[in-house]
Image (spheres, rainbow, N blue to C red):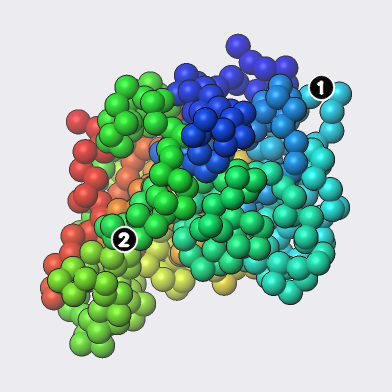
Amino acid sequence: MTTRQGHPPLHDYQRSVAANVLRMLRSNGAGGVERRGMISLPTGSGKTRVAVQAIVEAIRDDGFRGGVLWVADRDELCEQAVEAWAQVWRSEGIEAGQLRISRLWSGQPKPFPTTEDHVVVASIQTLNSRLKNRPADYKFLNEFKLVVFDEAHRSIAPTFTSVMDEIGLTYRRRADEPFLIGLTATPYRGHDPDETLRLVRRYGNARLDWGAFADDDPQNVIQELQDKGILAQADQEVIEGDTLRLTPEELEEIRRFVRDPQGWERVLAWLPSTAQDRIAHSAQRTRRILDAYKKHVEKDWPTLIFATSVEHAKTLAALLNREGVVARAVSGETRPAIRRRVVEGFRNGEIKALVNYAVFREGFDAPKTRAIIVARPVYSPNLYFQMIGRGLRGPEMTGGTDRCLILNVQDNIENFDQELAFSDLDWLWDR
């Protein structure tokens, strides 16, 4: 069964989440129903689709009007949101109606100032800058009735708070404030309970995904989705890494993250860049990664690799090309136009190995990914799960795969006893 433009219908759990979103929008804050809520679904299970479709149905069936502001923190996420809105509107929207979709990132001009059937997709950086420097030009956004924050676990950052203040979403709750929906696969802030509590309160302590599964426990949700083919089954191999001793300066840099003097290491995401650079320069470690690729990964498998540095990404890509694998390296230094071309080449199968440094941790959509190599030491379970989630879209989702192979590089840091994040997620792997 498909919709009028060939779009697949929502799965049962997505339909349940959409019903909760519609209930919130229909209530208009009455009857004790929150005007804020969080949708947390595992990466690859369709958060964007379910949110967009619920809003489109509210516009189509309930006459919901007033404009939608959709905010993400990277250009790739913004473009994916635009594509989702266009596809769902063609499939589910008002047949004779028009939806205006405006881009507001990377130097895009000011959108047409109307709230009528209008979606503005903005990067948080551009939106924050425009609201601060040209507030009069963007006053029309104050009339928008719904705000959506993608990758919402980041939304307690000062830039998000500043934007919320400008558009009427303050800590002093108002009966007529815009609706607020957050989307994330990880509705918490690492192991930090205070930061997580701030995040929970920002979304009114309301989860719009609760009740969509037999058990709301995150582990059971993922296993249910794997059983249904929504998420791929995961296979794991561990690659021996390097042995390293942190310098006093590196240990001090880590301690700057301290919130609890007895637990500073628990909020760490990465090693200091100097330590990562030393690991990246280990020729033996790089050779082991290449050997593991040749042993476990088929040459035609789309493979996403998380490198330890910019130079490490370039080195791995060069070595893979030498082995006959079409590989490209991208990083924050790569020009956006080139990065877009490389990503498109990976998605359409021309590029088989996409090696990146600090680019595709979150929100990157490449459903055919068959293998992932985590060659960068990761200590945050949040970030690690976001990274491997790039390959966990299952066969019941468009373009997904039955299985995904995850290769984890296990480095030994002699004077730092925090476990690498992949050890926290042993329950994920297929047994």
Q: Position of residue 309 (x, y in %)?
A: 41, 71
Q: Residue sitting at 86 percent across and 52 percent down?
A: 112
Residue marked by disc 1: 95
Three-letter code for the amino acid on which mark 2 is drawn: Asp
- Does the rendering let one see residue 355? no
Q: Position of residue 15 (x, y in %)?
A: 52, 22
Indicate which disc residue 223 carries: none
Front residue of this view, candidates 377 and 188: 188
Quarter of the view holding residue 376: bottom left
- Does the rendering let one see residue 248? yes
Q: Residue sitting at 21 percent across and 71 percent down?
A: 260
Front residue of this view, candidates 59 and 93: 59
Quadrant placement of the N terminus: top right
Count of marks, rendered view: 2
Asked if 223 appears above or below 407 in the picture, the reply is above
Indicate which disc residue 194 carries: 2
Q: Describe residue 49's horizontal placement relative to residue 127 as left or right.
A: left
Asked if 219 appears above or below 186 in the picture, the reply is above
Structural crowding at the residue carrying mark 1, measured as other residues with C-alpha within 10 Å and reported as few (<14), some (14–19) or many (≥20): few
Quarter of the view holding residue 86: top right
- Secondary structure under tag 2 reads helix
- Secondary structure under tag 1 reads loop
Front residue of this view, candidates 49 and 170: 170
Q: Residue sitting at 46 percent across and 53 percent down?
A: 202
Q: Describe residue 164's horizontal placement relative to residue 17 as left or right.
A: right
Front residue of this view, candidates 134 and 386: 134
